[in-house]
Amino acid sequence: MLLLTELAAFLDQRLERDRVPAEDQNGIYRASDRPIQRLGLALEPWADMAEWVRAESLDALFLHRPWKLDSAKLADDIGIVAYHLAFDERLTVGLNPDLAIALGLTELDVLGTKHNRPIGMIGNVPPQRLSAYCDRVRQCFGGAEFSSASEKGEKTVSRVAVVGAMDDALVREAHDHGAQLYVTGQVREAAALAVEETAIAVVAVGHHRAEMWGLQTLAAIVSEHWSTLQVRVALGRR
C-alpha cells in the first residue's frame, strides 16, 4: 500500500530536493492518508482538473506548479505532492542523467552553475552529422522551436552541451569545453553575439516540451518503482 509520505520520500531523493533552497523545496503540498493506487501527473492545475481527477479515479496528484490550485474542488482525501525547482533542474534541460541517456551523452561533466548549483551538462556523442543528431533531439522532445543545424551544413558533432539557461558566458563556456551544439529550452538574445562568434549550433526545444519530457519521464520512473501503481499524465496541459 503506497502512501503519500512514501511517494514524497522517494521523489525527494530522486529529484534531489535537498539541493535546492529550502523555500523552493516543496514536497507534500496537501497531506492525505488515502492509499494511492492511481496517481495523476500534471504541470499545473486547469479549470476542469477536478473532473479529470474524478474521471480517472485518482487518489493523489503530482503538480509541477501548484499555486493556482483550487483544492476546494477536490475530494478532501486527494493527496498532492509538488516539486517546482527540483523538477526543473533534475528532469528538464539541465544536469539530467535521464536525458543524457536518451540523447546518448557519455562522460558527463557539469556545465554552468547558478547559486552554486549545476544548471547544465556537457558530454560526448559518437561523431556524426550535426543535422542527424539535431533530428534525434527533436524526436526526443517531440519537436523544437528553433534549430540552427540547417545553417551549419554537414558539420560534425561529437560534444554536446545541455543547459537550462542561455547567456553569453554559458555559450562561451560550452564552446571552450569543446561543444559543437548547445541544447536549451529557449533562445535568448543575450547570447546572440557569443553564438555568432563561436559558431556553435543551437537547438531550443521549447519550455513546454522540456517540461512535458520531464513529466513523462517521471511517470516512467514512478511506474518502474511501483509496478502496480497506475499513473496518468495530463497531456497537453500547461
Image: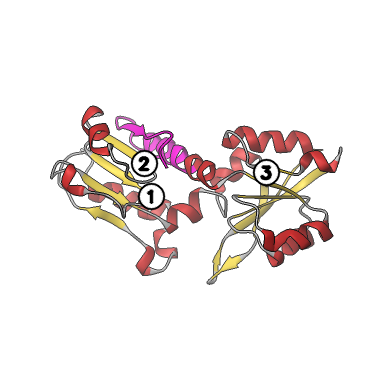
For the residue carrying disc 1, how many other residues have a C-alpha within 10 Å: few (<14), some (14-19), or many (20+)? many
> Real-space Cα distance between discs 1 and 3?
25 Å
- Residue 156 pos. (x, y %): 84, 42
- Residue 213 pos. (x, y %): 51, 40
So how many labels did they put on this image? 3
Q: Are marks 2 and 1 in contact (CB under 8 Å)?
A: yes
- Is 91 placed left or right of 145 in the picture? left
Decide which of tag 2 and tag 1 comes sooner along the chain: 2
Residue 42: numbered disc:
2
Give the residues in magenta: 214-238
- Is 14 placed left or right of 114 in the picture? left
Describe the element under mark 3 as helix, strand or loop: strand
Instruction: Please tell me whether residue 167 is drawn above or below residue 77 in the rendered image.
Output: below
Task: Please give the residue where the numbered disc 3 appears in the rendered image.
Answer: 146
Quarter of the image where one finds residue 222:
top left
Task: Please give the residue where the numbered disc 1 appears in the rendered image.
Answer: 64
Between 57 and 32, the residue placed more toward the observer is: 57
Q: Amino acid at mark 1?
A: His
Instruction: Please tell me whether residue 83 is drawn above or below residue 217 in the rendered image.
Output: below
